[in-house]
Amino acid sequence: MSRRTLLRTPGGKAGKSPLRPPWALAEASFIELCTRCDACITACPTGVLRRGGGGFPITDFSLGACTFCGACVAACGAPSRPQALRRQEGLPAWARVAAIGDGCLSRRGIECRVCGEACEAAAIRFRPRLGGVALPELDASRCSACGACQAPCPGSAIEMVALALPSDAPPDTSSLSAPNLEEAA
């Protein structure tokens, strides 16, 4: 890791990357290209983006959900500079999916369907059980990782986790690298 990358890395240390705005480049490229101008944060109509460590933008689902409108991408960068956010058709905003953890009230025997009611994609459904409350089941193929289910969960049981992609799947935008500026010149 270069000195510049170390100094620009949130917290000054490498490790688990925070969830960046949708369609962010791979972490190292994102840190290199992001100017911390807050244009993406200001442009976000749902207010789900905020400043994180080192002043870099992060997605905070406790503030709302992402509609994937692309306003953050449109606001990112100047014409003379490559963007830290780059939307590409056919690629998801993140390689993430919701995961329901042990804090789930339904899994503790308490009736709760808040996450399913918040999910417009109907990715969370509830399977009835004899003699117990219905349990949530996540259909990962329908989940966009928009975060709509995370904030209203009273048990704080939902988080967005990295999606394991098959080896032949196309990479998502988080694996994109910054273009070589010397080749472009």
Image: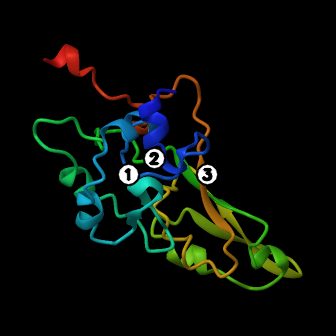
Q: Which residue occupies the extreme left position in the image?
A: 79
Residue at the far bottom in the pictured view: 111
In the image, is residue 32 above or below residue 66? above
Q: Position of residue 174 (x, y in %)?
A: 44, 38
What residue sits right under mark 3 in the picture? 161
The residue at which mark 1 appears reads as 22
Q: Quadrant of the C terminus?
A: top left
Q: CA distance from mark 2 to mark 1?
A: 6 Å
Left or right: where 104 falls relative to 158:
right
Dot 2: element: loop
Answer few, some or many: residues within 10 Å of disc 1's Cα (few below 14, many 20 plus, some between 14 and 19): many
In the picture of the structure, the residue carrying the numbered disc 2 is 94
Q: Residues within 10 Å of mark 3 (few under 14, many from 20)?
A: some
How far apart are labels 2 and 3 at the CA level?
10 Å
| Residue at 28 percent of width and 24 percent of height | 179
Which secondary structure lies at badge 3?
strand
Colour option used: rainbow
Q: Mark 1 is on which residue type? A: Pro
* Residue lying at 38% horizontally and 40% vertically, measured from the top left: 30
Q: Specify whether 60 is left or right of 82.
A: right
Q: Who is closer to the viewer here, 114 or 78? A: 78
Question: At label 2, which amino acid type do we have?
Answer: Trp
Q: Which circle's residue, 2 or 1, is located before the other in the chain?
A: 1
The quarter of the displayed image where residue 58 is located:
bottom left
Asked if the residue under mark 1 is in contact with the one under mark 2, i.e. CB atoms within 8 Å, the reply is: yes
Counting residues from the start of the chain, the first of labels 2 and 3 encountered is: 2
* SS type, badge 1: loop
